[in-house]
Amino acid sequence: MSKERIILALDVSDADYALELVDRFSDHIEIFKVGLELFSSAGPSVVRSIQDRGKKVFLDLKLHDIPNTVARAAIAATRLGVFMFNIHASSGFEAMRRCRDSVVELCLKENLNRPKILGVTVLTSLGQNTLKEELGIQHSLRTHVRQLSSLAMKAGLDGVIASGHEVSMIRNYCGKNFLIATPGIRPSWRPPDDQKRTMTPREAIREGADYLVIGRSILSQPDPLKALDLITIEMLTAK
């Protein structure tokens, strides 16, 4: 179960080191996240190298632009063969819909596997005060996440990226087939770092998360494989 549900975040800048990590965790992890740092330094080639090892890639670039630009980026990600990528739900309905429709059309035309497309709701580094005082969003954080999740579902996206604190609400509102990937996962023995809305692996699975995106809680530990084992145990004991 955990092998398919943990997404290991390769939040590093060096491609060789990233591939070392893929090799090291190959027996335990199926999906690896390539984010802004690694993709900016290594480009599409690192994605292909991970795929050549028989592993899936979650391309975490959080697309956020005008609909035409987002759609073209989505086509490029699809041709790259990624398992999953994301777009900011705050890009709006049209951008998300164009993104999804462009991917579906391309996959039918070129007989490609369709990647999962998830909408980013509210970053786990943001709290209620930031949302209200800096971004001018007056309703509650939970209401904002629910609204963005609903918009993503209406646009035809496969699911969303959301904090564990909103998973149960999204699950109840969007249904059991709507995918939810949860970052900000911190086992009880880890500090929250710069993440404000964190949750333990056990709690996130109990709330209904499909995927847990985990990086530092594994890779920064003296024995990363042991840390992964402990996290796996937490997930398996979630009821």
Image (cartoon, rainbow, N blue to C red):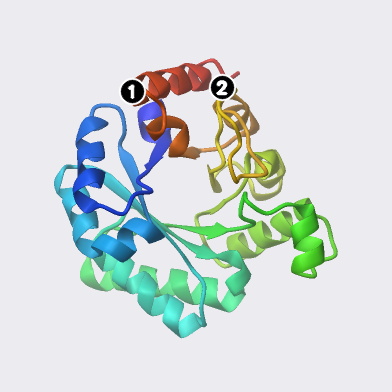
Residue shown at the point (49%, 37%) measured from the top left: 212
Q: Position of residue 19 (x, y in %)?
A: 21, 44
In the image, residue 136 sits, relative to residue 223, either above or below, namely below
Residue shown at the point (60%, 18%) measured from the top left: 239
Q: Amino acid at mark 1?
A: Leu
In the image, residue 32 sits, relative to residue 15, either above or below, namely above
| Label 2 or label 1, whichever comes before in sequence order | 2
In the image, residue 205 sits, relative to residue 39, either above or below, namely above
Does residue 109 show up?
yes
Q: Position of residue 153 (x, y in %)?
A: 60, 60
Q: Position of residue 62 (x, y in %)?
A: 48, 63
Which residue position holds label 1? Answer: 225
Which residue position holds label 2? Answer: 189
Residue furthest right in the image: 138
Q: CA distance from mark 2 to mark 1?
A: 15 Å
Q: Position of residue 181 (x, y in %)?
A: 52, 45
